[in-house]
Image (spheres, rainbow, N blue to C red):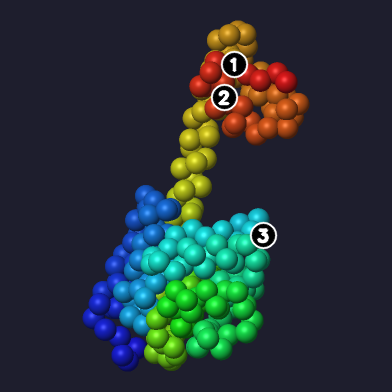
Amino acid sequence: MAGLTSSAWGCLEQLSRSLRVDEGDLQATLEAIARNATIAVPAADAAGINLVERAKFVPQAVFGKAPPILDKIQQQTGSGPCIDSSRDQQIVEIARMEFEGRWPRFSRRAVELGVHSMLCLPLLADERTIGSLSLYAGQPDAFDEAASGLANLFCALAALALGDAQRTDRLRKAMNNRDVIGQAKGILMERHRITSDDAFDMLIAASKRLNRKVVDLAVELAETGHLSVT
């Protein structure tokens, strides 16, 4: 692609290599995406990663002063370019923030913070997680065709990196849950002289009775030696 700087190519290459890291940390991956976005897309001065979790807009990582302030406004109002891009999985571009009328409160505060153009790109990590990568610039009309093309390429690689980190995170949590449930079963087996299946049935029965997750009860039992009965 014409117009790419050596630093931009280097950033994209670095992110591509990170896709092969099996033990990638989720939060570290999110922060790296936000930080590297401003290197890969030189027009951007700041960046943010936002995800939609259970129909809620949840900021995940930011780089720069403006994104957390503007994310808070979007959470308060329930509207904004990052929300629209995340929810609708569409590109949202603001060429001149001072003329933006779709989100008046957001655009006024953005101008006060020195943000004069934005580019929000949909981020599809996997079939369960959607969100957006938002780029902020101090200059109007900052994201020309070349910058937008580079941002799209970076976003595609970021989505792969994020999806890989999320799968690793879910696997790690599943293994931890399995371990703590095993500890809880061992306590019940020793205490009541029962089988592994009977101990697990006790946890399931308590979970249904208390309307709590089995793993939460297992953590409580492993940490305190007690299983809630009410």
* Secondary element at tag 2: helix
Q: CA distance from mark 2 to mark 3?
A: 30 Å
Q: Quadrant of the N terminus?
A: bottom left
The reply to whether dot 3 and dot 1 touch (C-beta < 8 Å) is: no
Classify mark 3: residues with Cα within 10 Å, few (<14), some (14-19) or many (20+). Answer: few
* Residue highlighted by disc 1: 226
Choose between 207 and 42: the one closer to the eye: 42
Label ID, residue 197: none
* Residue highlighted by disc 3: 55
The reply to whether dot 2 and dot 1 touch (C-beta < 8 Å) is: yes
Q: Going by the image, does 54 lie left or right of 34? A: right
Q: CA distance from mark 2 to mark 1?
A: 7 Å
* Secondary element at tag 3: loop
Image-quadrant location for residue 53 = bottom right
Determine if residue 30 is in view. Answer: yes
Q: Earlier in the sequence, mark 3 or mark 1?
A: 3
Q: Amino acid at mark 1?
A: His
Choose between 148 and 208: the one closer to the eye: 148
Q: Position of residue 230 (x, y in %)?
A: 73, 20
Classify mark 2: residues with Cα within 10 Å, few (<14), some (14-19) or many (20+). Answer: some
Q: Amino acid at mark 2?
A: Glu
Q: Position of residue 18 (x, y in %)?
A: 34, 61
Q: Residue furthest front?
A: 112
* Residue highlighted by disc 2: 220
